[in-house]
Image (cartoon, rainbow, N blue to C red):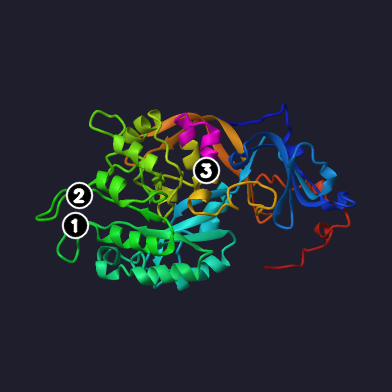
Amino acid sequence: MERREFFSAAVAPYALAVSPAFAQKSPTYDVVLKGGHVIDVANSINQPMDVAVLGGKIARVDRNIPAGEGKTTVNVSGHYVTPGLIDLHICCYYTNLTVTASVIADHHCLPSGVTTCCDGGTAGAESFEDFKRIIDRSQMRILSFLNIAAPGAQSSRAEQDPSQFKVELAADTAKKHPNIIVGFKTGHYGGPFDEKRTPWASIDSILEAGRLTALPIMADFTPLPAQGKFPARSYREFLLQKLRPGDIVTHCLASRYPFLMEDGKLNPDVTKARERGIKFDLGHASGSFVLRLVVPAVRQGFIPDTISADLFSNTPVTVGINLANVMSKFLCLGVPLEDVIRRTTVNPARIIHRPELGNLSVGSPADIAVFEMLKGKFSFRGSGGGKIVGDRKLQCVMTLFGGEIVYDHPHGLSIPLWEDIPKDSEYWVDNTRQRW
């Protein structure tokens, strides 16, 4: 049976209720989160601190900010407070019915503390304007790794057809939308090869788009043996010759990558690639977390630079993942909480060149996640079978985006007891005649 872990002794559940606005005479801030344990890796903070928000920005991170200084003050004692998480890889172009792999980002991300996500190539240059309609109406921040295949991931055919790798169109689209498009994506490109479908066509095309825009690429890659006159398409060449510093290998712990040698030791090419500045992204999805490979890699210190869920349509029901769940898997494998937070906040922010995100610096967007650490016995599924068991699990209880509380766990961290709502509040207005 699970229980909640608290930092301070005997914090009763009712003590977590909000201090309502009517109790403040001259508040300084819009929201004050009081009494939590702040983990802000970008600013080297890992201790109890209060966080104040004003005008959608972080206004103050300090000890003992008076409760009366917030229009809304929430007691978050016993909870972790972090920057809003960044999921570097999901699929969220859900209105495109030819893409069967998308989810509604708001529904899956905000309840796990994710305030920024990057769509991993479901849209290409020809479909981006349509995808932007989702971005524009989303409650959270959606960024994009634009698929080098102009139609996007509408079908496997587009990603297999080099005639669809429209480099200049991709680059022009990225230049038109610099606040949204953070890089380019390629994936699923395989053999057989011929004069038109050469082994490195997708990688070479996406690298050229990256060169034209000075943006990173995110590559989903499959090593393949030699075919006819074409030499092998190797993991080593991919890591050490093709990719540039700052480029991203996604699904980096998938079984198709030889990141472990036959003797089970970490492939030295991975170490060399990291020394070159190559970045490794988890991209969990439903098939990129095979425990017989992941566990020995993590034990040897190979932890992805970014931990992402790669949510798509069936992952919530097959392996039951959201980003908080994936983070909990790494806790179960012995990775310290601060390192897990690093890989879901400041690391992805730096990789996509968004320094204003992933931190609680004064003046940064007030994107904040509040977590409780459940204690008990928890099982976590791997891809393709098997599970691990741990005694801790992260659970998001509140998410703020731009200073607004956009998710509050069903136990109502920010909600006062009903008896404490002032009698002059609209709550007490007779609404019995209202009908939906």
The image quadrant where one finds the C terminus is: bottom right
Q: Are marks 1 and 3 in contact (CB under 8 Å)?
A: no
Structural crowding at the residue carrying mark 3, measured as other residues with C-alpha within 10 Å and reported as few (<14), some (14–19) or many (≥20):
many
Secondary structure of residue under mark 1: loop
The magenta span reads 330-343
Secondary structure of residue under mark 3: helix
Identify the residue shown where x is 33% and y is 51%. 243
Residue for badge 3: 324
Identify the residue shown where x is 29% and y is 42%. 255
As shown in the figure, which amino acid type bears the numbered disc 2? Leu
Looking at the picture, does residue 114 appear above or below residue 391? below
Foreground mark, 3 or 2, reads 2
Structural crowding at the residue carrying mark 1, measured as other residues with C-alpha within 10 Å and reported as few (<14), some (14–19) or many (≥20):
some
As shown in the figure, which amino acid type bears the numbered disc 3? Ala
Q: Is residue 317 visible?
A: yes
Residue for badge 2: 224
Secondary structure of residue under mark 2: loop
Foreground mark, 1 or 3, reads 1
Image x and y of residue 204, in percent = 29, 59
Residue for badge 1: 191
Identify the residue shown where x is 42% and y is 51%. 310
Image x and y of residue 112, in percent = 55, 47
- Whichever of labels 1 and 3 marks the residue nearer the N terminus, that label is 1
Q: Are marks 2 and 1 in contact (CB under 8 Å)?
A: yes
Image x and y of residue 152, in percent = 36, 66
Comparing 250 with 390, the one in front is 250
